[in-house]
Image (cartoon, grey):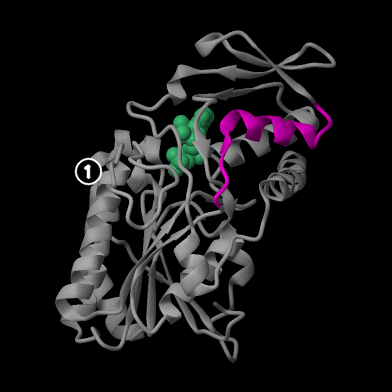
Amino acid sequence: MLEKGYIVHGVKRRSSSFNTGRIDDLYMDPHADDVRFFLHYGDLTDSTNLIRLVQEVQPDEIYNLGAQSHVQVSFETPEYTANSDAMGALRILEAMRILGLEKKTRFYQASTSELYGKVQEIPQKETTPFYPRSPYAAAKLYAYWITVNYRESYGMHASNGILFNHESPMRGETFVTRKITRAVAGIKLGYQDKIYLGNLDAQRDWGHARDYVEGMWRILQQDEPDDYVLGTGEMYSVREFVERAFAHIGVEIEWRGKGVDETGVDKATGVTRVVVDPRYFRPAEVELLLSDPTKAREKLGWQATTPFSELVREMVTEDLKTVAREQDR
Ligand code: GDP
């Protein structure tokens, strides 16, 4: 957004430890001239705060990317997840309405492929029925429909991007892709010897976040608001992600055993590198997600451009640097 010339206002939650590490390179000294990036304290669970911020900023576009976004954690904190992910979207839409910005401000809701959950059709597109499988997905289902409802009720330019998993070297460390690439880096550098994972057979449509943010922006530049699936149209298993990531450090993984006893072994040395730990199994699992992004291609001219192999390579390469830096401290 900054590269496109926007003035950007972000919202950050208060924490007693630093929590802006992933955007620190964008920081602009508020005393400098021509500041175009501002951060405000706020929270999707606090209506008064949201109304005041929207009033002060009078934004042309709002991207609601805020959420308790971890599926497994949502089983532990379901009420908080509903409050931030479902009610949070409603609070922003209401703030826009209360302040009379229905016709000025455009709204993007970060909807998710998790809505498809126990998939009713393969691949999944905009018309595929939803079947949420977690408190996270159930909360996001409300946010999806309240966005559609405000569009239809009040004529707001409010749109959903139904994004399939999008990853990058900045992905949170507890999501499976980043967990794997960090572990591969740690193993290569000798700081750890194995990784514990859950369901190795889950399949996902993994793309690069860099491509997807462009898609979000395009959704809001359309004359008419609408809902779009963004994904690559390709699907790989967690097991395949593991194999590719280890291949980048020259290790070929051989799978032995079945179910919870399955292990991934370095074929050359016989050393065990991957162990299944049932603590990472989910109470209800989303086994498979695969997008059909035809509508985005035809209407937005958008396509995912980063191949799976390149995504894995970039994440492993960056984590080799990150892990080395952390261990140096
Ligand atoms: P999600 O698709 O939003 O749930 O993204 P995640 O990266 O958290 O999980 C993707 C898939 O990987 C899910 O089907 C998980 O069950 C599976 N998975 C297997 N092992 C792990 C693990 O150790 N951590 C996480 N987060 N997911 C795992």
Q: Which residue is mark 1?
A: 79
Residue 277 among those drawn in magenta: no
> Which x, y percent locates residue 294?
49, 61
Q: Is residue 189 above or below residue 233?
A: above
Residue 254 appears in which quarter of the rendering? Answer: top right
> Is residue 94 among what the camera can see?
no
Query: What stretch of residues is rendered in magenta?
Result: 233-251
> Is residue 282 among what the camera can see?
yes
* Residue at point 51%, 18% (across, down): 277
Residue 251 appears in which quarter of the rendering? Answer: top right
Q: Is residue 292 above or below residue 266?
A: below
**Amino acid, disc 1:** Glu
> Which x, y percent locates residue 104?
30, 88
Q: Is residue 24 left or right of residue 199?
A: right
Q: Quick one: 220 or 290, which is closer to the camera?
A: 290
Q: Quick one: 326 or 307, which is closer to the camera?
A: 307
Q: Quadrant of the N terminus?
A: bottom right
